[in-house]
Image (cartoon, rainbow, N blue to C red):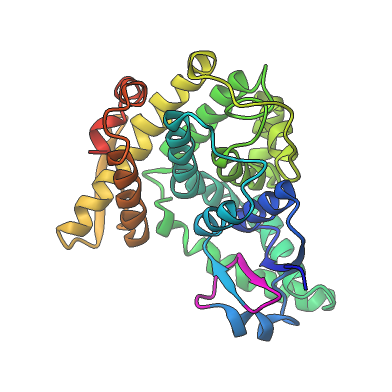
Amino acid sequence: MSDHYQIFGAELSPYSVKVRAYFRYKGIPHDWLPRTDENMAEFQKFAKLPLVPLVVSNHGDAWQDSTPIIEEFETMFPEPSIVPADPALAFLSALIEEYADEWANKYMFHYRWWYDADQVSAAQRLARDARPHAADVEIEAMAQMLRERMVQRLGFVGSHSTTKEQIESSFIRTLKLLEKHLTHRPFLFGGRPALADFGLAAQLYQCWTDPTPRKLFDQKAPNVAAWAEQMQDPSADGEFESWESLETTLMPFLQSEIGGLFLPWSDANAIALEQGKEKMSVTLEGKPFTQTAQKYHARSLGILRERYAGLSGNQLLDTVLAKAGCQQFLV
């Protein structure tokens, strides 16, 4: 029997649609199974954590966590590759993907659960996806319960009254910078999607489905919206570009979003955990940013640092990271 896979996921989960887009791009045979009440027992049979996405093979093998899933399947299905041949670009792609998972998720979650219109929209969609055959009265009750629970989790991603402006400014700046970068190319690194595309587009696509950030896409970033939609079922249109052709419009994004926000936050998070603190705090753009320290991300930062250490002596990468203000946080 040829390999076939099931992806247990949710339409409102950026990590789920990230993995689904990857499977579609690779042409990997799969079924998409929304995690509903009806298939919860099957999900729990294989899941080690109560989180989507979960990928299960027809042989009973199971994988969770979007980045390890993609990395594992990239070894099994290497073509078309999502890894630029240039090691410097491959690292930058992984860095942007890490930014997407850990920082872009902040503005995705913030917009979804901060404003009333977005809360109502998301809660009702989540309820309907979980119970597709339920009566409207049941959906309304479940939506209200979900709304209350998710709003209470805003602080977990660092969204509160003192960080609201920082998070929303980051989102708007990302739209403006990526709008320029994607004007003359279909994907972040050229003519085909890289790991970075799958990670970042998944977060921004979720923003695009919510009422408040959707208006900002319409006003400021039609190219970004088109890219995020295209990344739901992408195909290769060409080859990866060189850094020389990417630098003019990609460097500003690296400088402001990754060197200016994400890596300082990430480094401060790791330091707080090393010191045994429950809360982390860092000054970003002249203002304090505080939240609960994130253990998972401290581990993923360590992996990123190990990967950078393995590229010791790569002059192009060192030059790019130094100029972007990233290098000091990766050593």
Left or right position of 313 against 75: left
Q: Nearer the viewer, residue 59 or 319?
A: 59
Q: Nearer the viewer, residue 30 or 148?
A: 30
Res 214 → quadrant? top right
Q: Position of residue 253 (x, y in %)?
A: 47, 25
Left or right position of 327 against 217: left
Res 139 → quadrant? bottom right
**Which residue appears farthest toward the left when viewing the image?**
275
Q: Nearer the viewer, residue 157 or 179?
A: 179
Residue 144 versus residue 20 in the image, above or below:
below
Magenta run includes residue 141: no
Q: Position of residue 304 (x, y in %)?
A: 35, 46
Left or right position of 280 against 251: left
Residue drawn at x 52%, y 53% is 71
Residue drawn at x 85%, y 77% is 133
Question: Could you tell me how many numbered marks the image carries?
Answer: 0
Residue 82 versus residue 16 in the image, above or below:
above
Q: Position of residue 142 (x, y in %)?
A: 69, 75
| Quadrant of the image containing the C terminus | top left
Residue drawn at x 76%, y 45% is 233
**Which residue appears farthest toward the front when viewing the image?**
1
Q: Which residues are magenta?
A: 48-60
Residue drawn at x 74%, y 71% is 140
Residue 205 versus residue 294 in the image, above or below:
above
Residue 117 versus residue 135 in the image, above or below:
above
| Quadrant of the image containing the N terminus | bottom right
Magenta segment main secondary structure: loop
Q: Position of residue 201 (x, y in %)?
A: 62, 41
